[in-house]
Image (cartoon, helix red, strand yellow):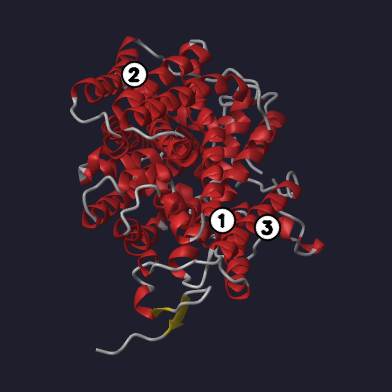
Amino acid sequence: MSSLLNATVLATAATVVPDSQFIFNTTDYVVFALMLGISAAIGVYFGFFAKGADTTEEYLMGGKRMKTIPIAISLVASQLSAISIMTIPAEMYAYGINWFFNVVCMLVVVPLLNYVVIPVFYNNNITNCYEYLEIRFCREVRVLQTFIFIMTMFFMLPIFIFLPSLAFAQVTGFNVHVINTVVCSICIFYTMFGGIKAVVWTDVIQAAIMVVSVVLVGVMGANRVGGLSEVLRIAGEGGRLDINYNFDLTTRSTIWNVFTSATIMWSGYVGLNQSCVQRIVSLPSLGHARRSLVLFGFGFILIMFFNCFTGIVIYSRFHDCDPIGSGHVSKVDKMVPYFVQDTVGHLWGMPGVFISCVFSAALSTLSASINSLGGVVYFDYIKPYIRHTEHRANVIMKLFVLFAGIYCIFGGMVVENFNSILQVIYSIGGVSFGSTCGVFMLGMLVPKAHGRSAMTGVLVSIVCMATIVILSWGRNHYDPLPTSTASCPAATLNGTISSTESALHLSSTTEAPAKDEGFSILDLSFNLYTVVGFAITWLVAIPLSYILKPRSGYKLDPNLLSPVVQPFVHYKATPTEEPLQLKLEKPEKV
């Protein structure tokens, strides 16, 4: 995943080279304006006309009366950022089908969340996932994880909204900062005044736009090539359907490292990240939450399937005349807009639908993130130091949403001048999911774990993974799969060979480490960073749970353990400094 972010950021931050562009007409502007107008109207309704939006529970969780299907759709929409829409097909075009197992892992993630994670939140009436870390371990662990969450979001948010603004500017000629300001302002408006209900219902509209765009582009593109069988034939001959079963830890993408890493990453991002947990626990019961997650998994796989399929179709369409090699496209991240123009650009309003799709993906991610950020900052860093009232809390959270939105506007101006430093930021952001998922799973699955062992495990994991990322910077490179310009008109190839090589290497991370140098931890595939971060957290914390004593007065509530562990735990309190005695035993046979 981090490679996709890196490719987009690096390529977008570089100097823009004129490419073939959409023909954006009045109809397209109307489609785009309609999407923004509906989003703003939803904010007006829930902010000024809907009842009960003046309490923190209503603002953050919709009074815990949200409906199953809208929450499921909202979760799908917020997981599909503009970066995903633009770069996943480019990833499939350049590196083949192995990334698709990032989607397949959802078949494991949804049951894992439904039966291991989410019941813990509902059984303990937890609405802030970081609150769990405090009552299970200690406040220091909670503060550390909320800090990681806040910093990661603040690094990412300006990128999420700036990239589609740049795409819009490229196809219309408008100033990118004007577009960024207008769209951010609308997002701030409906998020600040409408709260979680506005976020969810705008996500529903935006998800519908994404589905229409992604499915139409994939299906019509395949039809343009000659049908599904022809797409599969060409992609197979080009090596795009080859699955890599290699167990080599230095290989860029294999079925094993992609699936394992994605399972941890999506478990952390969907079930252990406040922007998602906040919506899941807004449902009235655990049963509603489980059904919503099942629907989310189905919707996520559906949209991502078509998104990945589009990448295979793009290769089939341009397999003998690579747009980068021919000079029609300057960078691989611009492949999708170029393909959309080539395939459906002639259809009434379709360019507008595609741009609306990209912005919908960005807005759904941005709105959910800043809404949850407001709650986390208030309850973790402000509430302990002021006299809490519902009115005061609402005002402070709305002001923070306003601040976060303004930060995104000005952050776009900084992003425009960034280059490779963003790769470091995103790599560290990706690594943080390993320790985050590790500490939550430690609390739910390991009864002996306590605050001191958990805190040490997280810190060691972050330090080790940050060191690996920094020291391996620029060391590991992976070549994309070969492309051809054999059928391109000769005139278009003059002077493009060197620029093609540069563009391809910019979007990748280039050749694999030499085997005769021996294995080094610095040669580790970036796809394994999350796995290693998770493993370090456990390998450090579990032994320390037996070596170090918990703090005086510490007592484990068995309800804080996952239901899959509780039957194996015999709990008995004793009047000692360490009142927790845990005996693992097999459940009695019935």
Q: Is residue 35 visible?
A: yes
Contact (Cβ within 8 Å) of mark 1 with mark 3 = no
Mark in front: 1 vs 3: 1
| Disc 1 to disc 2, C-alpha distance | 40 Å
| Disc 3 to disc 2, C-alpha distance | 43 Å
| Residue carrying label 1 | 435
Q: Residue furthest right?
A: 517
Q: Position of residue 404 (x, y in %)?
A: 48, 26
How would you rate the neighbour count of disc 1 (Cα within 10 Å): few for under 14, some for 14-19, many for 20 or more?
Answer: many
Comes first in the chain, label 3 or label 2: 2
> Dot 1 lies on which element?
helix
Q: Residue furthest front?
A: 575
| Residue carrying label 3 | 524
Which amino acid does the dot numbered 1 rest on?
Ser
Rendering quarter of residue 530? bottom right
In this rendering, is residue 333 above or below 301?
above
Q: Residue furthest bottom?
A: 589
Q: Position of residue 77 (x, y in %)?
A: 35, 38
Q: Is residue 486 visible?
A: no
Q: Position of residue 205 (x, y in %)?
A: 27, 30
Which amino acid does the dot numbered 2 rest on?
Phe
> Dot 2 lies on which element?
helix
Q: Nearer the viewer, residue 28 or 198?
A: 198
In this rendering, is residue 77 above or below 102?
above
| Disc 1 to disc 3, C-alpha distance | 17 Å
How would you rate the neighbour count of disc 3 (Cα within 10 Å): few for under 14, some for 14-19, many for 20 or more?
Answer: many
Which label sits on residue 32? Answer: 2
